[in-house]
Structure formats: structure tokens, C-alpha cells
Amino acid sequence: MSRHNITGSEAFDRRPFVYIRSVSSGGLRRRRARLALGFVLGVIVALAIVTVGLLMIFMPPPA
């Protein structure tokens, strides 16, 4: 069941259906910065896990 309320010649108007406004690139920049930050944090966590693993393998057992 449709809820649209188109009256008169509104459906056949020459205006564009969607108004396009200029959008700043701030959102894309923030998304890219968040992705880069997540990648860097992932690399840091991976290096910490590898370091702990290597220490557990190569450290002498406690006496």
C-alpha cells in the first residue's frame, strides 16, 4: 500500500527528483584516517603478540 501523496502536476514537474548539494570531503577523509589508524594499531598489536610469543619460546625456564 502506497503512502505517497502526489497531488496535481507535482509528479510531472521539471524539477530534479533529488536535490544534489555539495558535500565536503571531510567524511571521506575521516573514514580514510580511521582506516589508517586501525591498520597501524593492528600492526602494533600483531608485533606485540609476536614479541611475546618469541619471548615465551626463547627465554630459559624459571629455576
Image: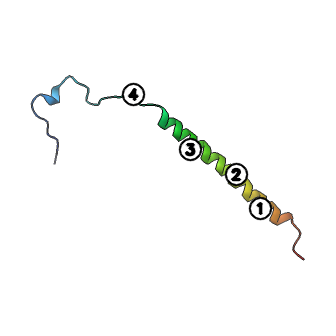
Q: Position of residue 47 (x, y in %)?
A: 73, 53
**Residue type highlighted by circle 1:** Val
Q: Earlier in the sequence, mark 2 or mark 4?
A: 4
Q: Along the line of sight, which residue is nearer the eye, 29 or 61?
A: 29
In what quadrant of the picture does the C terminus appear? bottom right
Residue on which the image places disc 2: 44
When asked about the image quadrant of residue 50, the answer is bottom right
Q: Residues within 10 Å of mark 2 (few under 14, many from 20)?
A: few
Spatial CA distance of label 3 from label 4 is 23 Å
Name the residue furthest left: 8
| Secondary structure type for disc 2 | helix
Residue on which the image places disc 3: 34
Residue appearing at x 78%, y 58% in the figure: 51
Q: Along the line of sight, which residue is nearer the eye, 1 or 42?
A: 42
When asked about the image quadrant of residue 16, the answer is top left
Spatial CA distance of label 1 from label 3 is 27 Å
Q: Along the line of sight, which residue is nearer the eye, 53 or 36?
A: 36
| Secondary structure type for disc 1 | helix
Q: Residues within 10 Å of mark 4 (few under 14, many from 20)?
A: few
Colouring scheme applied when the structure was drawn:
rainbow
- When the figure is inspected, residue 3 is found, relative to residue 19, above or below; the finding is below
**Residue type highlighted by circle 4:** Ser
Residue on which the image places disc 4: 22
Query: In the image, is 30 to the left or to the right of 50?
Result: left
Q: Earlier in the sequence, mark 3 or mark 4?
A: 4
CB under 8 Å between discs 2 and 4? no
**Residue type highlighted by circle 3:** Arg
Spatial CA distance of label 2 from label 1 is 12 Å
